[in-house]
Image (cartoon, helix red, strand yellow):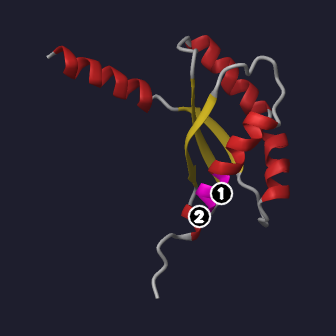
Amino acid sequence: MLKDFSRSMRLERSLYKEIAVIIQKNLRDPRLNSFITITEVKLSYDLSYAKVFITFLNYDDKKNIKIILGILQNATGYIRSLLNKKIYLRIVPKLFFVYDTSLINGIFISELIKNI
């Protein structure tokens, strides 16, 4: 009997959901006043590292993007400790937050197509 999803895909979905809830409800930094959206979570082959792709509204400035990514990167220990309580894993993956530019690129391409 074949499984529809591998373990890494199921874990990516669980991490996606739990990290989104943690960022919205548990992080209380006043500098995180924008709506942060997780677009994707990618796990390494050995499940020890996770890239969390995020995007947020109201910030197009590269300086603000770096500040928010720095805040999230500094909070990874706290996020991992909360993940450890919610998802039972032997090793909780190390998190790396990356700004996802695919949404902006998609909007740019759509505008180019409209202008043709």
Viewer-side residue, 34 vs 77: 34
Viewer-side residue, 30 vs 46: 30
**Which residue does the image show at 66% across and 20% down from the upper left?**
34
**Which residue is tagged 1?**
14
Q: Please tell me how many numbered marks the rendered image carries.
A: 2
In the picture, residue 24 is in which quadrant? top right
Evaluate if marks 1 and 2 touch, with contact meaning CB atoms under 8 Å apart. Answer: yes
Q: Position of residue 111 (x, y in %)?
A: 28, 18
Q: Tell me: 41 left or right of 30.
A: left
SS category of the residue bearing label 1: helix
Vertical arrangement, residue 73 with respect to residue 48, above or below: above
Q: Position of residue 17 (x, y in %)?
A: 65, 50
Give, as a three-letter code, the residue at label 1.
Answer: Ser
Q: Tell me: 85 left or right of 57.
A: right
In the picture, residue 96 is in which quadrant? top right
Q: Is residue 13 magenta?
A: yes
**Which residue does the image show at 73% across and 33% down from the upper left?**
73
Magenta stretch, residue numbers: 10-15
Q: Position of residue 13 (x, y in %)?
A: 59, 56
Q: Residue furthest bottom?
A: 1
